[in-house]
C-alpha cells in the first residue's frame, strides 16, 4: 500500500484542483450554457455546411511522390559512402537534387500545383 | 469588485467599433472613421473582434436584417449605436461607451441571449450539405454559396455579391445593392450634380471632394492589398482634404503617399494583372471615368486614382465628371462598374476577387439615389 500513497495523493490533488477550477468557472459564468452562433458571413445566413469535400489531386501528388521517392532511392546508398568519398560526392548529389528542383519549379510556374 | 472595475475601464478606453456603412450615409461613415482615429479607438474587422456596432445611416429592411444578424454575432459586452447624420456621430460614440460601462445592463443582456435558430428550411435545425458541380478539370467538386455581403470591412456600402465557391475559387457570382434611405444627393457626386443642374458651386469645393473620393477608394484598395500603413495615410489625407486643412499640407502628404505607392514593388507584383479592362473593353461596357482612363489592371486603376487626386488638388480645371465617371448620361456611372463585376471575378479566388472589386469600387449611393441628370 505504501508504494501507492504517492500516486494516489497526486491523483487526489489533481482531481480536487480540476473540481475547484470547474466550480470557480461556473461561479464566474454569466449564464449556464455557452452562446452558439453561426460563422460570420457578412450579415447573411449560411446556405450550406462549410464542411465541404475537395479533391486530393491524385495525379499531381502521385507524380511528385514518385519523383522524390526515386530520388530517395538514390540517396540511400549515397548516404552510406559519402563520409569516405568526401566533397565531390556531396556536390554530385546536390546537383542531382538541383535538377529535380528545376523540374518542381517549372511545374509550379505552370500552375500544376494549384489545388482548386 | 475591483477587478471588474479595472477591466471595464481598461476595455472602454479603446473600444473596437464595427462600422456598418449604409448607402446614403457616406458622410456619417467618414465622420465616424475620423472620430475613431481621433479618439484612438480601433476599427474592428469582424463581429467577433468588435465591442460596438455603429450603423452609419438609415438602413432599409434587408440591410437592417443583416445588421441584426451581425449584432447577434457580437460577443458580450457589446453596444449598438446608430447615427444618421455626421453631427450626431460623436454623441453616438459616447452613448456606445455608456452602454459598455453599464455593467448591470450587460449582465442582463448576457443572461438573455439565445442562440439564433435557423430559418424554416426543409431541414430544420441543420444546414444542408454542399451540392456538387463541375470544376475546371471536369471533376465534380462541392460548391458553397457565400454572400459577400453588406457588412464587410473595406467594402462598398450596401453592395452584396452572391458567389458560388469551389475551394476558394469563384465559379459564378451576381452583384446587387441593398439600400438605405436618404433624401440627399450621393455624397461624392453632390457638387458635380449641383453644377450640372445649374446651381452655383465653388470649384475648390468640387476639387476637394473629387480628390477625397479618389483617396477613399485608394485607401480601401491599399488596405485590402495588405498595406495598412498606406491605407491609414490615405485616410488621413482624405480627412485633411475634406476638413479644414490647408491645400498645401494635403498636397504635400498626397505627393509623398503617391511616391511611396509607386515605388512599392510588392504592391505592383500583387495587384498587377487583376481585373484587366483595357480601353476598348471598358468603352464597350459603357465605363467612364478613371476606370476608363486607366485602361488596364487593378494596379493601373489605383495609380490613376492617386494621380487624379493630385491633379484635382493642384488647381487644374475640373470637368463635369464625378469620381466614378460621367454624370450627364442616363445611367449612373457606377452601374457599368457593377455590371462588369460578375464577369471579372469569375475564376478568381476570394482575395483576388476582393481586390478586383476594390479596384473598380462602384458607389452604391449613386445606384440607389440616382446620380444622373438625364434620369427621369
Image: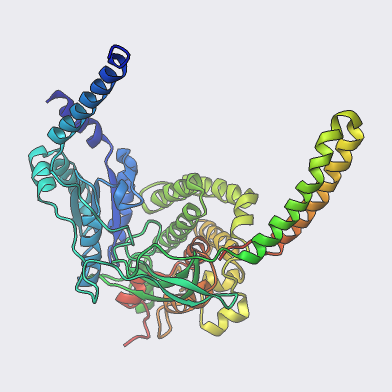
Q: Nearer the viewer, residue A4 or B187?
A: A4
- Image quarter of residue B36: top left
- Of all residues shown, which one is farthest toward the front? A1
Q: Is residue B198 visible?
A: no
Q: x, y percentage for residue A23? A: 15, 31
Q: Residue drawn 23% across and 71% down?
A: B62
Percent x, y of residue B372: 37, 80
Residue B124 horizontal/vertical position (percent):
21, 70
Q: Nearer the viewer, residue B290 or A91?
A: A91
Looking at the image, which residue is at 61% across and 77% down? B279
Extreme residue toward the bottom, this view:
B376
Q: How is the image coloured?
A: rainbow
Above or below — where is B9 with respect to A12?
below
Q: How many marks?
A: 0
Q: Write the residue at 52% across / 65% down.
A: B349
In the image, B318: left or right of B112? right
Residue closer to the observer: B95 or A40 = A40
Quadrant location, the N terminus of chain B: top left
- Quadrant where the C terminus of chain B lies? bottom left
In the displayed structure image, the side of residue B20 where residue B267 appears, left or right: right
Tell me where residue B167 appears, x and y as whole percent.
49, 65
Is residue B341 at least partly visible in the picture? yes
Where is B45 relative to B12, above or below?
A: below
Q: Nearer the viewer, residue A83 or B7?
A: A83
Instruction: Answer with left or right where residue B339 lies relative to residue B123.
Output: right
Relative to B343, B43 lies left or right: left
Amino acid at each position: 500500500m505504501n508504494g501507492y500513497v504517492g500516486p494516489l495523493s497526486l491523483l487526489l490533488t489533481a482531481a480536487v484542483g480540476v473540481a475547484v477550477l470547474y466550480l470557480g468557472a461556473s461561479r464566474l459564468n454569466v449564464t449556464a450554457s455557452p452562446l452558439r452562433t453561426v460563422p460570420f458571413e457578412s450579415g447573411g445566413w449560411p446556405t450550406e455546411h462549410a464542411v465541404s469535400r475537395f479533391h486530393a489531386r491524385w495525379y499531381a501528388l502521385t507524380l511528385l511522390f514518385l519523383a522524390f521517392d526515386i530520388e530517395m532511392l538514390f540517396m540511400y546508398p549515397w548516404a552510406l559512402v559519402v563520409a569516405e568519398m568526401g566533397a565531390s560526392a556531396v556536390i554530385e548529389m546536390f546537383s542531382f537534387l538541383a535538377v529535380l528542383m528545376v523540374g518542381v519549379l517549372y511545374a509550379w510556374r505552370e500552375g500544376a500545383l494549384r489545388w482548386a | 469588485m475591483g477587478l471588474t472595475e479595472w477591466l471595464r475601464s481598461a476595455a472602454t478606453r479603446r473600444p473596437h467599433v464595427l462600422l456598418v456603412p449604409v448607402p446614403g450615409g457616406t458622410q456619417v461613415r467618414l465622420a465616424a472613421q475620423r472620430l475613431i482615429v481621433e479618439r484612438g479607438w480601433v476599427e474592428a474587422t469582424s463581429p467577433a473582434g468588435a465591442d460596438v456596432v455603429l450603423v452609419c445611416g438609415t438602413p432599409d429592411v434587408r440591410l437592417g436584417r443583416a445588421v441584426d444578424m451581425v449584432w447577434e454575432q457580437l460577443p458580450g459586452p457589446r453596444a449598438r449605436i446608430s447615427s444618421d447624420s455626421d453631427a450626431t456621430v460623436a454623441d453616438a460614440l459616447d452613448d456606445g461607451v455608456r452602454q459598455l460601462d453599464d455593467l448591470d445592463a450587460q449582465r442582463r443582456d448576457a443572461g438573455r441571449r439565445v442562440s439564433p435558430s435557423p430559418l424554416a428550411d426543409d431541414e430544420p435545425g441543420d444546414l444542408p450539405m454542399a451540392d456538387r458541380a463541375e470544376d475546371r478539370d471536369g471533376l465534380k467538386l462541392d460548391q458553397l454559396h457565400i454572400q459577400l455581403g453588406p457588412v464587410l470591412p473595406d467594402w462598398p456600402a450596401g453592395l452584396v455579391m452572391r458567389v458560388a465557391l469551389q475551394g476558394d475559387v469563384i465559379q459564378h457570382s451576381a452583384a446587387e445593392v441593398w439600400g438605405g434611405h436618404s433624401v440627399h444627393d450621393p455624397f461624392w457626386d453632390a457638387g458635380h450634380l449641383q453644377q450640372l443642374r445649374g446651381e452655383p458651386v465653388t470649384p475648390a469645393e468640387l476639387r476637394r471632394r473629387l480628390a477625397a473620393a479618389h483617396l477613399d477608394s485608394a485607401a480601401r484598395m491599399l488596405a485590402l492589398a495588405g498595406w495598412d500603413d498606406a491605407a491609414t495615410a490615405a485616410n488621413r489625407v482624405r480627412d485633411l482634404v475634406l476638413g479644414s486643412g490647408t491645400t498645401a499640407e494635403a498636397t504635400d502628404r498626397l505627393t509623398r503617399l503617391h511616391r511611396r505607392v509607386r515605388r512599392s514593388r510588392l504592391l505592383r507584383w500583387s495587384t498587377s494583372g487583376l481585373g484587366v479592362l483595357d480601353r476598348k473593353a471598358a468603352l464597350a461596357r459603357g465605363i467612364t471615368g478613371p476606370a476608363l482612363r486607366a485602361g488596364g489592371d487593378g494596379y493601373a486603376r489605383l495609380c490613376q486614382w492617386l494621380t487624379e487626386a493630385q491633379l484635382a488638388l493642384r488647381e487644374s480645371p475640373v470637368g463635369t465628371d464625378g469620381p466614378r465617371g460621367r454624370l450627364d448620361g442616363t445611367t449612373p456611372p457606377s452601374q457599368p462598374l457593377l455590371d462588369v463585376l460578375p464577369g471579372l471575378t469569375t475564376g478568381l479566388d476570394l482575395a483576388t476577387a476582393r481586390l478586383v472589386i476594390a479596384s473598380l469600387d462602384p458607389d452604391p449611393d449613386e445606384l440607389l439615389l440616382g446620380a444622373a441628370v438625364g434620369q427621369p
